[in-house]
Amino acid sequence: MYLLTISLFELGQFLRILLWVFIPIFILVLLITTYIHHRRKRQVPKVVLEMGDLLMSGEADAIAYAEYQPDEDKLYKGLLWMKEKFEEYRVQADERVGLLRVQLDERKPVHRVYNDW
């Protein structure tokens, strides 16, 4: 029984042939997948955001894209809700920073502690 012996040059040639075959196939599959995804997204929205309600893909298939018209009042209320949440988060962050500053001011500097020994 003989062992299969190949040189590094032959291995390199084999890998180059594989790359010449599989890279174009990969690019072609990637383009086809992108086109199919784009076509589906254009036809029907998969997730419709409406005042925090989510329609999953099964429900969204029933809604045609032309039928979905956002309500101006709901859109404005949604923006106001987002603004209030942002301001609430900003106030919480300011409180945390203030608390950290107080804690930092209460600490002794490290060099003074070492000098006291």
Image (cartoon, rainbow, N blue to C red):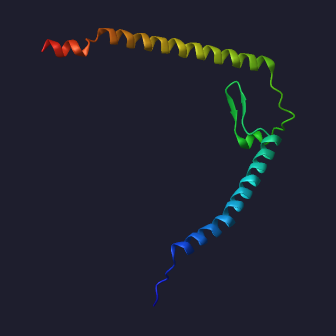
Where residue 32 appears, x then y in whole percent? 76, 54
Q: How many marks?
A: 0
Which of the 4 image quadrants contains residue 117?
Answer: top left
> 20 or 90: nearer the eye?
20
Q: Looking at the image, which residue sits at the far right?
A: 66
Residue 46 lies, with reference to residue 73, above or below; the image says below
Where residue 30 appears, x then y in whole percent? 71, 54
Residue 19 lies, with reference to residue 33, above or below; the image says below
Residue 107 lies, with reference to residue 55, above or below; the image says above
In the image, is 72 to the left or to the right of 97? Answer: right
> 112 or 8: nearer the eye?
8
Residue drawn at point x = 56 percent, y = 75 percent: 10
> For the N terminus, which image quadrant?
bottom left
In the image, is 78 to the left or to the right of 71? Answer: left
Q: Looking at the image, which residue sits at the far left?
A: 117
Residue 10 lies, with reference to residue 64, above or below; the image says below
Where residue 50 appears, x then y in whole percent? 72, 27
Residue drawn at point x = 51 percent, y = 76 percent: 7
Where residue 11 appears, x then y in whole percent? 55, 72
Residue drawn at point x = 68 percent, y = 29 percent: 53
Which of the 4 image quadrants contains residue 67?
Answer: top right
Residue drawn at point x = 34 percent, y = 12 percent: 104
Q: Looking at the image, which residue sits at the far bottom?
A: 1
